[in-house]
Amino acid sequence: YDKQIGTSEGEKNSLSYNENTFLLNCKTIMYLIRKPPKDFEDLVKEHFRRRGYYILKACDAYMKGYLIGSLSRDASVTDKSEANATSVGFKLMLAKIVPKLITALSEVGADFQEFQHLQQS
């Protein structure tokens, strides 16, 4: 992909890669919560209990079309965040995953109340 840097084809491939990676990360989160590595159960549970809100906040922003990777550390929109930058296919796939992700994160005690509207998918 080095030859594609700065080209429209490179931007398109980068966006696709980032979208797929984010979806896989969401699936990995659910798997880790369900089956944490032996002796790391408490660490995994505590990590996702603390970070779950921000994960869901990012999902919400990305479903609204903000560019993946353009949010701040606390998943807030920044001046670098581009609206309408994610693909329709990505938004549809994320809409299918998010209700399951909310369930998994709620099981470890993450704050999800603000994102209940995402379960209406």
Image: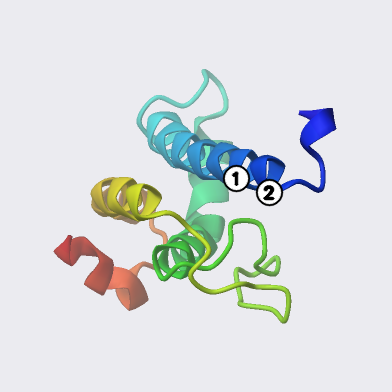
Residue 100 marker = none
Q: Residue 76: x and y, percent? A: 61, 76
Residue found 70% across the figure and 41% down from its top: 10
The amino acid type, in three-letter code, at marker 2 is Ser
> Between tags 1 and 2, which lies in front?
2
State yes or no: discs 1 and 2 in contact (Cβ < 8 Å): yes
Point out the image quarter for the C terminus: bottom left
Q: Is residue 62 above or below residue 24?
A: below
Would you place residue 79 above or below residue 35 in this image?
below
Q: Would you identify the image quadrant in which residue 27 lies? A: top left
Q: Residues within 10 Å of mark 1 (few under 14, many from 20)?
A: few
Report how far apart the C-alphas of labels 1 and 2 lie in the structure.
6 Å
The amino acid on which the numbered mark 1 sits, given as a three-letter code, is Lys
Q: Residue at x 38, y 37 (%)?
A: 30
Based on the displayed image, in which of its 4 quarters is residue 80 positioned? bottom right
75 versus 17 height, above or below: below
Q: Among all residues in the image, which is located at the extreme front?
A: 8
* Tag 1 residue: 12
The residue singled out by tag 2 in the image is 8
Q: Quadrant of residue 69?
A: bottom right
Residue drawn at point x = 46 percent, y = 32 percent: 28
Q: Secondary structure at mark 1?
A: helix
Mark 2 crowdedness (10 Å alpha carbons): few <14, some 14-19, many ≥20: few
